[in-house]
């Protein structure tokens, strides 16, 4: 892949999509083509297993204040917590293979392999999943030379900013796994608990300065 690739990771509500719009605007003003890619937890071969988990109660949905919350408790089954990540890896590789790419465009990943891996770590409570062959295979899918950063936001601010996280029972674990991944993989972390303009400038400076 010859594209310039940026990847903004972080839990739901951390501000990824908002700042990606700023990054897109920055490069479009420079007459550079940009492709925004959102690819998270595709369900192909894993779909029948998902249906089975719903049937036996490992997947649950609740509605609070007209917002639907889903949670996967795959950690309650050792077998499911091993099978599901493997199927998700197969699904993700297939979906990525079929994703239309443009070698002339700057690629900006919103949701990608690391976010799917983070979801799996939460759902299975295998907080070292990134260190075994499954996790390493997800990480390897990130294109070489990708400029990557992770947006960090505290739990209180996420719940205030994003309505569908208000009663998310797994939010603490989601924040936890991104902290683990950023630390163990050496990913640049930007604190998004601060002023919007300040954060935007820091993101753009990090991405553009290191390109030049």
Image: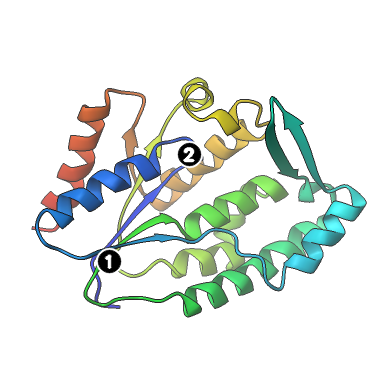
* Other-residue count near label 2 (Cα within 10 Å), few / some / many at <14 / 14–19 / ≥20: some
203 relative to 89 in the view: left or right: left
Secondary structure under tag 2 reads helix
Q: Nearer the viewer, residue 89 or 46?
A: 46
Residue 145 numbered mark, or none: 1
Corner quadrant of residue 197? top left
Vertical side of 188 occupied by 134: above or below? below
Query: What residue is pinned by disc 2?
Result: 179
Question: Looking at the image, which residue sits at the far right?
Answer: 56
Vertical side of 175 occupied by 119: above or below? below
Pointers 2 and 1 in contact (C-beta within 8 Å): no
Rendered location of residue 177, percent (x, y) = 55, 42
Residue name at image x 56 percent, y 62 percent = 135
Residue name at image x 46 percent, y 22 percent = 157
How far apart, in angstroms, are the residues tagged by discs 2 and 1?
22 Å
Considering the image in quadrants, where does the C terminus appear? bottom left
97 relative to 65 in the view: left or right: left
Q: Nearer the viewer, residue 176 or 6?
A: 6
Residue name at image x 56 percent, y 77 percent = 94
Rendered location of residue 119, percent (x, y) = 60, 50
33 relative to 91 in the view: left or right: left
Tell which circle, 2 or 1, labels the residue nearer the N-terminal end.
Answer: 1
């Amino acid at each position: 892949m010859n594209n310039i690739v940026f990847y903004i990771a972080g839990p739901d509500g951390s501000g990824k999509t908002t700042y990606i719009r700023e990054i897109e605007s920055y490069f479009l003003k420079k007459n550079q083509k940009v492709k925004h890619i959102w690819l998270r937890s595709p369900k192909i071969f894993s779909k029948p297993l998902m249906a089975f988990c719903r049937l036996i109660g490992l997947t649950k949905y609740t509605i609070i204040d007209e917002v639907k919350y889903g949670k996967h408790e795959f950690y309650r089954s050792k077998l499911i917590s091993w099978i599901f990540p493997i199927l998700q890896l197969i699904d993700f590789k297939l979906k990525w293979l079929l994703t239309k790419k443009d070698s002339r465009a700057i690629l900006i990943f919103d949701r990608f392999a690391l976010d799917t891996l983070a979801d799996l770590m939460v759902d299975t409570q295998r907080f070292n999943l990134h260190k075994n062959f499954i996790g390493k295979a997800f990480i390897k899918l990130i294109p070489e030379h990708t400029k990557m950063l992770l947006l960090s936001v505290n739990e209180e601010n996420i719940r205030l900013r994003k309505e569908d996280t208000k009663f998310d029972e797994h939010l603490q674990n989601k924040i936890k796994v991104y902290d683990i991944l950023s630390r163990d993989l050496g990913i640049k972390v930007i604190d998004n608990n601060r002023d919007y303009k300040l954060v935007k400038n820091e993101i753009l400076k990090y991405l553009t300065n290191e390109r030049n």
